[in-house]
Image (tube, grey):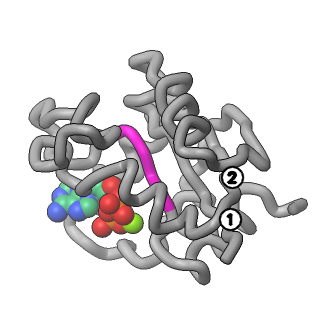
Amino acid sequence: MTQRSLVLVKPDGVARGLTGEVIRRIEAKGYTLARLELRTATRELLEQHYEEHVGKPFYEPLVEFMLSGPVAAIVIEGERCIEGFRSLAGATDPTAAAPGTIRGDLGRDWGLKVQQNLVHGSDAPESAEREIGIWFPQS
Ligand code: DAT
Ligand code: MG
C-alpha cells in the first residue's frame, strides 16, 4: 500500500553535507519527496517526536544533539516506504549497521554513543502519521 514516512536528516548529517546523499538514495530507491524543509527543532517539538523515549537514559543527550543544528525534515511517499526507508537507513548503531545502508556507509561511532546516526525514519504507519503531523502540522 502507498504510505508516507517522516525522514529526518539529523544535525550530524546536515553538518557533514550529507543531505543530498540521503535524498539521492531515497530518490534512487524510487520514493517521492512530498515535503522537504530545513528546520531547527525545539525542545517542545522533540518531546513530541521522541515521546516513546522520554525518561530513558539517552533521552536528554539525544534532545541536546537534535537541537545542536538544523535538520532536514522530509516526507517521502511510496509503496511500503516506511519499511523501505528503515532498510535504507540500516541499524540504529552506525558502527554495526550493514554496509550499503546510509548509517553503515556514512556513519560511525564518534564517541557519542549511537545518537549521531545521521537519519530518522518512522517505524510504523501510526508513528509516521503522528510524526508528519508534528513536523508538518498544516499537512
Ligand atoms: P531508530 O532511530 O533506529 O528508530 P530508536 O527509535 O530506538 O532508534 O532511538 C531513537 C534514537 O535515539 C536513535 O536514533 C539514537 C538514539 N538511541 C537509541 N538507543 C540509544 C542508546 N541505547 N544509547 C544512546 N542513544 C540511543
Ligand atoms: Mg525510532
Q: Amino acid at mark 2?
A: Val
**Image height check: is 17 above or below 90?**
above
Indicate whether residue 58 is drawn in magenta. no
Query: What distance separates the C-alpha of mark 2 from that of mark 1?
Result: 7 Å
Residue at point 26%, 72% (across, down): 56
**Image height check: is 56 above or below 41?**
below
Quarter of the rendered image showing ligand 1: bottom left
Dot 2 crowding, Cα within 10 Å, few <14, some 14–19, many 20+ = many
Describe residue 50's horizontal placement relative to residue 37 as left or right. Answer: left
Magenta portion: prevailing SS class? strand
Specify the quadrant that holds the N terminus. bottom right
Which disc is residue 75 wearing? 2
The range drawn in magenta is 117-121
Describe residue 62's horizontal placement relative to residue 105 as left or right. Answer: right
Residue 101 point in image, percent of width and height: 30, 42
Marks 2 and 1 close (CB-CB < 8 Å):
yes
